[in-house]
Image (tube, grey):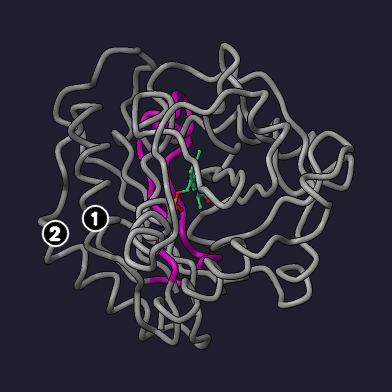
Amino acid sequence: MLYLNGEFLPASEAKVSALDRGCLFGDGVYEVVPVYSRHPFRLEEHLARLESSLATIELPNPYPRAEWARLIHQLIVMQDFDDQSVYFHVTRGSAYERDFPFPANVAPTVLINPTPLITPSAQTKASGVRAISHVDFRWLRCDIKSLNLLPAVLMREAARRVGCAETVLFRDGFLSEGAASNIFVVKDGVVFTPPKSHLILPGITYDVVIELCQNNGVPLEIRAVAEAEVRAADELWMTSSTKEVLALVELDGLPVGNGTVGPLAQRLDALYQNFKN
Ligand code: PDD
């Protein structure tokens, strides 16, 4: 069951207009919240980020935060699986005329769609995954969780074709993030990650991992990370709501550190697993 514009209905019956601006222009924003044993993790933070994305694109928030939370909780109960990935988006709705500026008097489209949460298996966590890199050719507002996902689609597909799970992005010689994740780098026992800016999505998992480092005495520096530092790292991890903390053990065909999941990746994943429950 999903929620679409005020109705709860099976996915097979959910229809939006062919002229929806999400479809024509990618004119909308979205969120993905992980749900463990029917408890959404960091829902308030996801709703706060949604508010910020909506405000940035000048799309009025259709619901107050409490209403979003109520709808999401209602849907979580309706599913027949416990661990869920709750996707939701708001688009600027549909107007008859295809015109770029905002249409007047158009209702937004609201979709909330929970699906089973597929996190990396214990085996994948233990072996780590491989990654490639690419120039970050996205726009300069990567802090908005926008529906314009073509770069991520192309970069994840390029990774998949060569047996990799993620594409690590570099802009002007510095690490930005993954195609759909934030990236952490470890060198000599210190964790590094780029600061929040218009060049990366302010990840909810990124914030959790930073908190876990700070609360558990793991040395952490939030600063610009040069591409050369990434390539010389002892460990690399990707973080996201669906991948949690996942080690990258190979980058562009070369081993990261000794090519196995490092001790800090294991530690942070263990802390994360403990914290999320
Ligand atoms: N993607 N950076 C980008 C570009 C992302 O798309 C994501 C998440 C993240 C990590 O954010 P968070 O920790 O809040 O999940 C960073 C989601 C999972 C997706 O598009 O499916």
Q: Position of residue 162 (x, y in %)?
A: 89, 40
Q: Are marks 2 and 1 in contact (CB under 8 Å)?
A: yes
What distance separates the C-alpha of mark 2 from that of mark 1?
7 Å
Please state if 252 lies on the left or on the right of 261 as rendered: right
User: Is residue 19 placed above or below 219 in the rendered structure?
Assistant: above
Which secondary structure, mark 2?
Answer: helix
Instruction: Work out which quarter of the rendered image holds the N terminus and state it.
Output: bottom left
Asked if the stretch drawn in magenta spans residue 31, the answer is yes
Which residue is depicted at the point 24% across and 19% down? Answer: 102
Asked if the stretch drawn in magenta spans residue 258, the answer is no
Image disc number at residue 63: none
Residue 141 or 25: which is nearer the viewer?
A: 141
Name the kind of residue labelled 2 in the image: Arg
Per the rendered image, the range of residues in magenta is 9-34
Disc 2 crowd rating (10 Å Cα; few below 14, some 14-19, many 20+) is: some
Q: Position of residue 192 (x, y in %)?
A: 49, 41
Image disc number at residue 65: 2
Q: Earlier in the sequence, mark 2 or mark 1?
A: 1
Residue 30 or 9: which is nearer the viewer?
A: 30
User: Which quadrant of the figure has residue 64?
Assistant: bottom left
Which secondary structure, mark 1?
Answer: helix
Disc 1 crowd rating (10 Å Cα; few below 14, some 14-19, many 20+) is: some
Residue 257 or 47: which is nearer the viewer?
A: 257
User: Is residue 272 placed above or below 79 in the rendered structure?
Assistant: above
Q: Position of residue 4 (x, y in %)?
A: 35, 59
Which residue is depicted at the point 68% across and 56% down? Answer: 247
Residue 191 or 250: which is nearer the viewer?
A: 191
Which residue is depicted at the point 42% across and 68% down? Answer: 2
Name the kind of residue labelled 1 in the image: Leu
Image disc number at residue 47: 1
Which residue is depicted at the point 46% across and 69% down? Answer: 114
Q: Position of residue 219 (x, y in %)?
A: 43, 53
